[in-house]
Image: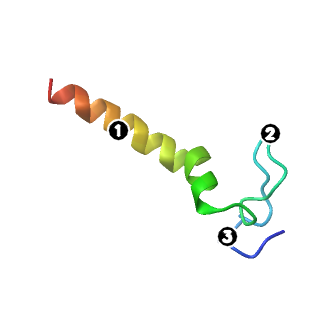
Amino acid sequence: RGASGFGYDPIFVPDNYTQTFAEMGNDIKNTISHRAEAVKELSAFLSTLSE
């Protein structure tokens, strides 16, 4: 379901959600995506290097 996104976005519904990735806005997708989690972890790691 849904028209936005790409690839498998119209198929996958994340846990605890009722919409597919293609139905969600980017603001929601970016808070739960594995890429967003990776950037958060990278940012935390890089901040330890400047201490």
At which x and y percent is residue 22?
72, 66
Q: Is residue 15 above or below residue 5?
A: above
As rendered, which of 49 and 26 lies closer to the eye? 26
Residue positioned most to the left? 50
Badge 3 is on which residue?
7
Pair 1/3: label in front: 1
Secondary structure beneath label 2 = loop
Q: Residues within 10 Å of mark 2 (few under 14, many from 20)?
A: few
Sooner in the amino-acid sequence: mark 1 or mark 2:
2
* Distance from the alpha carbon under mark 1 to that under mark 2: 26 Å
Disc 1 versus disc 2: nearer the observer: 2
The Cα atoms of the two marked residues, 1 and 3, are separated by: 26 Å
**Residue at image point 42% right, 39% down:** 40
Marks counted in the figure total: 3
Could you tell me which quadrant the C terminus lies in? top left
Extreme residue in the bottom direction: 3
Scheme of colours in the image: rainbow
N-term mark: 2 or 3: 3
The residue to which callout 1 is attached is 42
Q: Position of residue 31 (x, y in %)?
A: 57, 46
User: In this rendering, would 14 be left or right of 43?
Assistant: right
Residue ID for mark 2: 16
- The amino acid sitting under disc 2 is Asn
Percent position of residue 10, x then y: 77, 67
Name which residue type carries label 3: Gly
The residue under the point 72% across, 59% down is 21
Which structural element holds mark 1? helix
